[in-house]
Image: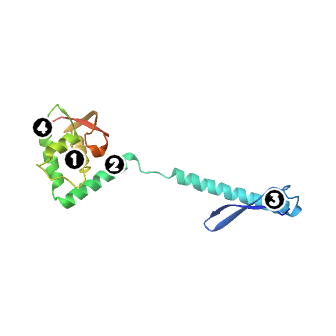
Amino acid sequence: MKARVLVVLESKGIELIRLYPPGLDNSERSFDIYRKVKPLLRQIDQSLKNKELKDIEKPKPDGVTLRDKGIRMAIEHAEDLHEGWQGKALEFLEGFVKENRGRKFSGEMVRLTAKGVLEDPPSLRAWGSILLYGARRGWIKQVGWIRVENPLAHRTPAALWEGCL
């Protein structure tokens, strides 16, 4: 029986060949080849494992980074289509909070109240920027969670805010 050869991996044009251990074909030549190739295969296997581990260990963007990137994109798009939208939305939020001091509300409630007063941004996510700005300025504080009514949002949880002005 001839020595059997198994191709185990082809990576970046390098063909790695594994020979079955001696005894499967009772050939001295097979044993000699296997003995010489086995350490090389171990090195290659280890280097591939290390490469895989390095890929796994690469830092991935966290949720806050992705959230902020999405909010930034939404607000920039709103400004591109409706110049000054962010400033008008902030003024609206400030007035809304003053009128509703101490009352709890969602971003969705603010957005629906703004309908007809402000033009809608191309993405409703632009309101996230406005609410975060209000929270950072101390106009509002998060006091819990509420399920949104927007059918496209599938009743996802959203922040429940309370006015502080």
Q: CA distance from mark 2 to mark 3?
A: 55 Å
Q: Is residue 33 left or right of residue 110?
A: right
Seen at 27% across and 43% down, the residue is 151
Residue situated in front as seen by the camera: 112 or 103: 112
Label 1 neighbour load within 10 Å: few <14, some 14-19, many 20+: many
**x and y, in percent, of residue 140 in the image:** 21, 37
Cβ atoms under marks 2 and 1 closer than 8 Å: no
The amino acid type of the residue labelled 3 equals Arg
Task: Give whichever of discs 1 and 4 has the lower sequence position.
Answer: 4
Residue at the spot 13% in from the left edge and 47% down from the top edge: 91
From the image, tell me which residue sits under label 2. Answer: 67
Write down the residue under mark 1.
130
Element type where label 1 sits in the image: helix
Quarter of the figure that contains the N terminus: bottom right
The local crowd at label 4, few if under 14, some if 14 to 19, many if 20 or more residues have their Cα within 10 Å, is some
Q: Which mark is residue 13?
A: none
User: Residue flagged by tag 2: what amino acid is it?
Assistant: Arg
Of callouts 2 and 1, which one flags the residue occurring earlier in the amino acid sequence?
A: 2
Earlier in the chain: of badge 2 and badge 3, it is 3
In the image: residue 148, left or right of residue 90:
right
Q: What mark, if any, has residue 35 been given in the picture? A: 3
